Image (cartoon, rainbow, N blue to C red):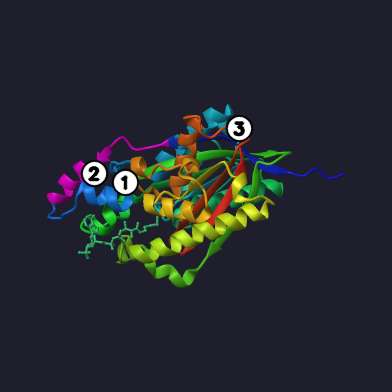
């Protein structure tokens, strides 16, 4: 008889830079640059009230390593037992080596696999799917899956349509091999023909930035695609596990805009009381948003052992995906 192998979340953790910036503070800072915005506009259009912004010396690997340590502590395990680190980030410390290798170094461990995943705001669900597959196939036994971002570095602070939307931070989970799920189903998608609606279309070559080094976005196009993608992939993932949306205890979508969360939940027939929303506190932290929301809800006692959580990502690429997990 073959014993099925699964993966299971055994700990979660978060990290933020020290600087907490309220809408009012940001409005003042932007006014100093001649950029006009308001707390009312930001709250009404996005639900965001504050964000953490990294000091120049703080990097994705530093935030990722801190989140990882918190997740290891929550799981009650030593870093030395980790044999896989995947970091989802679009704001890596370097061109190379990967942010995952820098996190491994910061944790003082060697030998296991470490690599980055680049799927922008869907990065965490892409990384979870990769880690789950690697654990189930026997390539790894205990993984750190991290979403870590310093999106403030790629924002054009003269573009009020984007600079008020994002924040910095990192969230992490420890995923461990188990003989019962755990991760019930994962589904991933991409549509590269939509790459132009959300991108940072620059790179480093010949010692200089080539192209455009700041994030640009067609907000309304992203909004429409995001809602339909989150609805469709959520349904697909739950069905793949032989379940229905009524079997989901908590929906944890990518935290980009409270209106996207509300529209998605409405389409899925999931009440607001079953949706974890952190966008007001953290703003959009890209690949970090889902693990940060998960950690918050685990630590405040909303997400309980045995419950089913549907985590969903959507973002640049265009990419989207979902992971259904039993805690
Ligand atoms: O993580 C990746 C996924 N990203 C997303 O999911 C973002 C998706 N998109 C959105 O969340 C929304 O489209 C935004 C929040 C980005 C924008 O909201 P919107 O309701 O689509 O506004 P809009 O872009 O249509 O802009 C409406 C007005 C414009 O003025 P006019 O042309 O109507 O006079 C903008 O210039 O709001 C103006 N505006 C602002 N006003 C004050 C844009 N940004 C600002 C601002 N403060 N910060």
Q: Residue 92 in the image: x percent, y percent?
A: 41, 51
Q: Which residue is mark 1?
A: 48
As displayed, is residue 298 above or below residue 133?
above
Judge from the rendering whether residue 64 lies leftward or rightward of residue 242; answer left or right. Answer: left
- In this orientation, which residue lies closer to the viewer: 75 or 62? 75
Label located before the other in sequence (3 or 2): 2
Give the CA separation, mark 3 to mark 1: 29 Å
Q: Does the CB distance between marks 2 and 1 fall below 8 Å?
A: yes
Q: Which mark is residue 23?
A: 2
From which residue to which does the magenta span run? 15-32
> How would you rate the neighbour count of disc 3 (Cα within 10 Å): few for under 14, some for 14-19, many for 20 or more?
few
Q: Is residue 175 magenta?
A: no
Instruction: Classify the position of the N terminus by image quarter.
Output: top right
Question: Is 29 inside the magenta-drawn segment?
Answer: yes
Q: What is the CA distance from the residue labelled 3 to the residue labelled 2? A: 35 Å
Q: SS of the residue at dot 2?
A: helix
């Amino acid at each position: 008889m073959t014993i099925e192998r699964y993966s299971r979340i055994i700990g979660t953790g978060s990290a933020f830079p020290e600087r907490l910036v309220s809408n009012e503070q940001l409005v003042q800072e932007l006014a100093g640059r001649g950029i006009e915005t308001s707390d009312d506009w930001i709250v009404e259009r996005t639900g965001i009230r504050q964000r953490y912004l990294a000091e120049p010396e703080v990097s994705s690997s530093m935030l990722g390593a801190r989140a990882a340590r918190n997740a290891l502590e929550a799981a009650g395990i030593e870093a030395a037992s980790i044999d896989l680190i995947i970091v989802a980030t679009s704001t890596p410390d370097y061109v190379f080596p990967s942010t995952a290798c820098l996190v491994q170094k910061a944790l003082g461990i060697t030998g296991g696999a470490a690599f980055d995943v680049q799927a922008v705001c869907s990065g965490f669900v892409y990384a979870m799917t990769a880690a789950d597959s690697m654990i189930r196939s026997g390539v790894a036994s205990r993984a750190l899956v991290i979403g870590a971002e310093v999106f403030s570095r790629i924002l054009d602070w003269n573009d009020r349509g984007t600079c008020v939307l994002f924040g910095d931070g990192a969230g992490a989970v420890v995923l461990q091999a188990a003989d019962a799920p755990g991760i019930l189903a994962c589904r991933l998608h991409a549509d590269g023909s939509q790459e132009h609606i959300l991108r940072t279309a620059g790179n480093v070559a010949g010692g200089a930035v080539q192209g455009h080094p700041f994030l640009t976005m067609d907000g309304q196009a992203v909004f429409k695609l995001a809602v339909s993608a989150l609805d469709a992939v959520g349904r697909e993932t739950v069905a793949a596990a032989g379940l229905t949306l009524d079997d989901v205890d908590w929906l944890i979508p990518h935290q980009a805009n409270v209106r996207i969360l509300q529209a998605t939940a409405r389409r899925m027939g999931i009440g607001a009381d079953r949706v974890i929303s952190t966008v007001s506190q953290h703003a959009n932290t890209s690949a970090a948003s889902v693990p940060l929301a998960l950690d918050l809800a685990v630590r405040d006692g909303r997400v309980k052992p045995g419950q089913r959580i549907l985590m969903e990502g959507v973002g640049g690429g265009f990419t989207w995906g979902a992971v259904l997990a039993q805690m």
